[in-house]
Amino acid sequence: MRRISFHTALRAGFSLIEVNMAIFVLAGGALALLGLFPLGLRESLAARNEMRVAAFCERFMGAARTVAEKPGVVDADTLLDELEGDFGFRVEDPVEDDDRVEAHEDPENSGVWYRAWWKEPDVTNSGNIETVNNGDRKTEAVQVCVQATGEDCSKNTRPLKTAPVYVVNVFVTSTNK
């Protein structure tokens, strides 16, 4: 049997420097992991805002299509009145100056801010979209555009100015009398 001296037994184990180095390495790894949490929360919030904005824009475009198919909607003015009356969406005339952009909050309080406008489609860019007269029926095309953001625009409309624009072409049909 091998005998271990008292002096050798005292030297077995880790030194204070080795223990401190191990603690520093573990602390550095833990801090790196903790640093990822704010990034994950920020990305989660951005994804939630994007989902709310996409849902709002889909609801807005669906409302424009639904209103255009109603029997009493015969021109662009009636379309816009119905869109504002039935769904609470404010649709403005086109604004060329971005400094005059007015932001509206979603009527369903989803946290989405938007601006919507309408315009007659540009026939040169859209090809076959135009007003068509077929005897006693007249079909008119209207472009309804919306920009939306999940950021609060009550004091600053900058996030709204940089938001993407969604466009839907709707057709209203009237009877000529």
Image (spheres, rainbow, N blue to C red):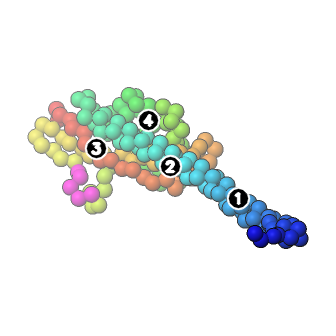
Q: Amino acid at mark 2?
A: Ala
Q: Residue furthest right?
A: 7
Q: Position of residue 28 (x, y in %)?
A: 72, 63
Image quadrant containing the N terminus: bottom right
Residue holding disc 1: 31
**In the image, residue 132 above or below residue 5:** above
Secondary element under disc 4, as helix, strand or loop, is loop
> Which residues fall within the magenta stretch?
126-130
User: Callout 2 environment at 10 Å: few (<14), some (14 to 19), or many (20+)?
Assistant: few
Q: Which mark is residue 67?
A: none
The answer for how far apart the CA atoms under marks 1 and 3 are is 54 Å
Residue holding disc 2: 47
Q: Which mark is residue 170?
A: 3
Image depth: mark 4 or mark 1 in front = 1
Q: Position of residue 87 (x, y in %)?
A: 40, 31
Image depth: mark 4 or mark 2 in front = 2
Circles 1, 3 touching at the beta carbon (< 8 Å): no
